[in-house]
Image (tube, rainbow, N blue to C red):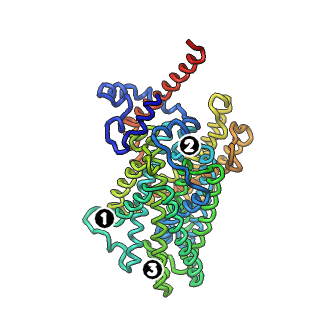
């Protein structure tokens, strides 16, 4: 066994054999594959009901990477990664788009609403990241609490979020770069006769993605240092935007405050949620954190609390500087300063925005690759993407997968299409995380009585159904109120039912979400509500992507994960037998 381990360690990182992509028994021959397909129903039931555990995610799956990632990050690094991963295209670009199209000056309330929802999700992520410090983030957490199939759907959305999110930020980078050069926003894109939203080709976005990924692949520690410098400079620009913005504020620009009504606030909130995306990347760095139980809560909660305040101040200053009807959708802050006579300031803002978006891409390249690595460790995608380079300690293959996919999308697709799809995918993942936290606290396999399990499921379904009802009623009758008399009390009763009739089965070891079940239940409700505020097109695109994921799962992911799980079980049984034999002696 030791000799085999030595051979594994000395194998070249750069290899492209079939066994590195399809090592599972089901794919060793066409006969095996046909046999696997014939067992699809049985295997699906097995994967639907199976659960991973903390030890498997923390210890066993990491062996699939052959080399360990380097523990080199502290709470200071994570805090600056938090700033670097979040403050970017969302605040600098999406703000103008949503202010003009949906919310008007009330965009500040949209940021408050989405910020509260994001903070609830941060609480859930923090507890999981401290308890299960692995690179897989939400994928690993859901595999433990909700099983392989739910984890796969989430994995698909994580990959979608990673690829689309990077593409959206890269497209926004080009818009601000043209502002810095004092040129029209689409002047550096290639104009074609393709369909609208796909007719402006963006080679600069592709170049930025490649450069960011290259830095991330070289070293996590060096990436942290680069991020710290760039984010510190960006923070100075943000302070300038807030102070100079209020210095040139005209309160009359806030009138009318609600030009699109209350519905517009929540429509915008669902889209600007994109601006808070990225904090989940911090959870994926737990495997490289020196002291996860201390550093992750400080880094995640500290950075996100500050970011919510910064965002609200920034959009309020923007609303008071320029009338919402005159806002430039592509570069709102730069053009707003130009409108008040500070033409030189627009170049400073554009430079700050570029720095912010660069760090978002940089930290995104780190976090997204680590998600992908752990998904590959579980064989949801080929395990070749799980390999960690022995010298750099970084997952180069996973980084290449995300970067190449993002570059292809960024080259063709407009920001409007990307933002709505990204927000829905992000909200879905965060909603599932809140569900998983409730499951973790109130259900332990082979310990929780069946009667309590049935009560818990019933109350959880009431919470989710009432949240969907509230969201649907808001969409159908935004000025109505009768429906809320039914849906809101139902949500309250479902949450109260868990609080009063069920005892928590597991307590967090280091740091836990306060006010359970109320905060996770509220997170479920707010995420579902914001999902319902998105347009029909976002759901159609989300549905198409989900169907593609399911087809992939039925023909590949299901059989790969089934073989992987049963291979681990056989190895465990073999080890137990060997221990029994050695104890009994010859």
- Mark 2 or 1: in front is 2
| Mark 2 residue crowding within 10 angstroms, few (<14) / some (14–19) / many (20+) | many
| Mark 1 residue crowding within 10 angstroms, few (<14) / some (14–19) / many (20+) | many
Sequence-first tag of 3 and 1: 1
At x 54% / y 65%, what residue is drawn? 228
Mark 3 vs mark 2, CA separation in Å: 43 Å
Looking at the picture, does residue 114 appear above or below residue 126? below
Looking at the picture, does residue 184 appear above or below residue 79? below
Nearest the viewer among 351 and 266 is 351
Q: Quadrant of the C terminus?
A: top right
Q: Secondary structure at mark 3?
A: helix
> Residue 179's spot in the image, x, y percent?
40, 77
- Mark 3 or 1: in front is 3
Side of 402 where 521 appears, left or right: right
> Residue 331's spot in the image, x, y percent?
44, 74
> Residue 193's spot in the image, x, y percent?
25, 65
Which residue in the structure is indicated by mark 3?
347
């Amino acid at each position: 066994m030791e000799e085999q381990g030595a051979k594994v360690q000395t194998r070249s990182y750069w290899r492209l054999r079939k066994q590195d992509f399809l090592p599972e028994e089901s794919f060793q021959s066409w006969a095996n594959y046909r046999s696997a397909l014939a067992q699809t129903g049985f295997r699906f039931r097995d994967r639907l009901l199976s659960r991973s555990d903390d030890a498997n995610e923390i210890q066993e799956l990491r062996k699939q990477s052959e080399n360990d990632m380097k523990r080199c990050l502290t709470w200071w690094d994570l805090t600056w990664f938090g700033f670097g991963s979040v403050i970017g295209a969302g605040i600098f670009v999406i703000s103008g788009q949503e202010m003009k199209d949906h919310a008007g000056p009330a965009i500040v309330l949209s940021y408050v609403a989405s910020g509260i929802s994001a903070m609830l999700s941060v609480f859930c992520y923090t507890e999981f990241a401290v308890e299960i410090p692995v690179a897989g983030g939400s994928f690993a957490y859901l595999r433990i609490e909700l099983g392989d199939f739910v984890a796969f759907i989430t994995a698909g959305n994580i990959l979608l979020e990673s690829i689309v999110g990077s593409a959206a930020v890269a497209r926004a980078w080009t818009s601000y770069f043209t502002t810095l050069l004092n040129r029209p926003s689409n002047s550096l894109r290639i104009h074609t006769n393709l369909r609208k939203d796909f007719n402006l080709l963006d080679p600069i976005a592709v170049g930025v993605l490649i450069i960011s990924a290259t830095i991330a692949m070289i070293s996590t520690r060096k990436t942290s240092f680069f991020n710290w410098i760039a984010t510190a400079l960006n923070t100075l620009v943000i302070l300038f935007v807030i102070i100079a913005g209020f210095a040139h504020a005209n309160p009359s620009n806030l009138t009318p405050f609600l030009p699109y009504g209350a519905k517009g606030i929540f429509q915008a909130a669902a889209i600007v949620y994109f601006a808070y995306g990225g904090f989940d990347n911090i959870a994926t760095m737990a495997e490289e954190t020196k002291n996860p139980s201390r550093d992750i809560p400080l880094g995640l909660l500290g950075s996100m609390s500050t970011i919510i305040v910064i965002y609200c101040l920034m959009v309020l200053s923007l609303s008071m500087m320029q009338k919402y009807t005159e806002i430039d959708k592509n570069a709102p802050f730069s053009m707003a300063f130009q409108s008040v006579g500070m033409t030189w300031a627009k170049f400073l803002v554009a430079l700050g925005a570029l720095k912010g978006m660069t760090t978002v891409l940089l930290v995104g390249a780190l976090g997204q690759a680590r998600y992908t690595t752990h998904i590959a460790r579980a064989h949801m995608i080929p395990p070749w993407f799980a390999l960690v380079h022995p010298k750099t300690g970084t997952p180069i293959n996973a980084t290449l997968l995300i970067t190449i996919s993002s570059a292809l999308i960024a080259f063709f697709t407009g920001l409007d299409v990307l933002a709505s799809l990204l927000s829905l995918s992000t909200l879905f993942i965060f909603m599932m995380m809140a569900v998983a936290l409730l499951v973790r606290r109130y259900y332990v396999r082979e310990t929780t009585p069946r009667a309590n399990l049935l009560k818990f499921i019933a109350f959880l379904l009431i919470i989710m159904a009432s949240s969907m009802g509230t969201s649907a009623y808001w969409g159908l009758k935004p000025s109505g109120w009768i429906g809320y008399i039914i849906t809101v009390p139902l949500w309250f009763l479902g949450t109260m039912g868990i609080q009063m009739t069920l005892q928590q089965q597991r307590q967090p070891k280091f740091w836990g979400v306060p006010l359970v079940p109320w905060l996770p239940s509220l997170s479920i409700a707010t995420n579902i509500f914001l999902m319902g505020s998105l347009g029909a097109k976002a759901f159609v695109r989300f549905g198409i992507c989900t169907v593609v994921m399911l087809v992939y799962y039925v023909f590949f992911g299901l059989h790969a994960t089934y073989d992987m799980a049963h291979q681990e079980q056989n190895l465990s049984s073999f080890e137990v037998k060997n221990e029994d034999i050695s104890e009994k002696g010859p």
